[in-house]
Amino acid sequence: MPPKFDLTVAAIAEDAGRFLMVEERAIVRTLWLGRRELEARAREHRSPLVMASIDDYLRGPRHSLELLRQLPLDGIEARMAVG
């Protein structure tokens, strides 16, 4: 399973003519809910990570994207196959 990251952004404008995509599926609507409302609908979430991510956001610290780094994958598959 690939790693999951939660990113926070500030919206600067809404463009009703554009579609948001998640895992190559269009988001069909936006619904703004408070934390209690989200928790009440937890069985509708794709994963328990949804509430965990929201709680992490509400709890605090923010980190710069500089914290993340992509390493080259050259040869990793071969090393994993060797064991």
Image (cartoon, helix red, strand yellow):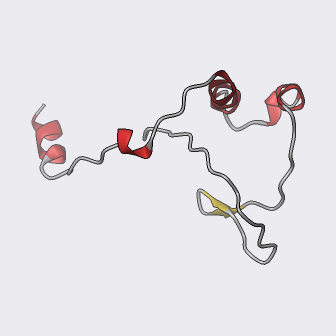
Q: Quadrant of the N terminus?
A: top left
Q: Quadrant of residue 49?
A: top right
Relative side of 64 to 58, left or right: left
Name the one closer to the observer, 34 or 82: 34
**Residue at 67 percent of width and 27 percent of height:** 48
Name the one closer to the observer, 71 or 10: 10
Name the one closer to the observer, 43 or 17: 17
Whole-percent x, y for residue 21 in the image: 65, 62
**Residue at 70 percent of width and 38 percent of height:** 46
Whole-percent x, y for residue 73 in the image: 21, 50
Relative side of 51 to 81, left or right: right
Q: Quadrant of the C terminus?
A: top left
**Residue at 47 percent of width and 35 percent of height:** 63
Q: Quadrant of residue 17?
A: bottom right
Q: Quadrant of residue 24?
A: bottom right
29 up-or-down from 4: above or below? below
34 up-or-down from 23: above or below? above
Whole-percent x, y for residue 67 in the image: 37, 38
83 up-or-down from 18: above or below? above
**Residue at 55 percent of width and 26 percent of height:** 61
Instruction: Count all numbered tags in the image, as a single digit.
Output: 0
Whole-percent x, y for residue 29 in the image: 84, 59
The outermost residue toward the top is: 59
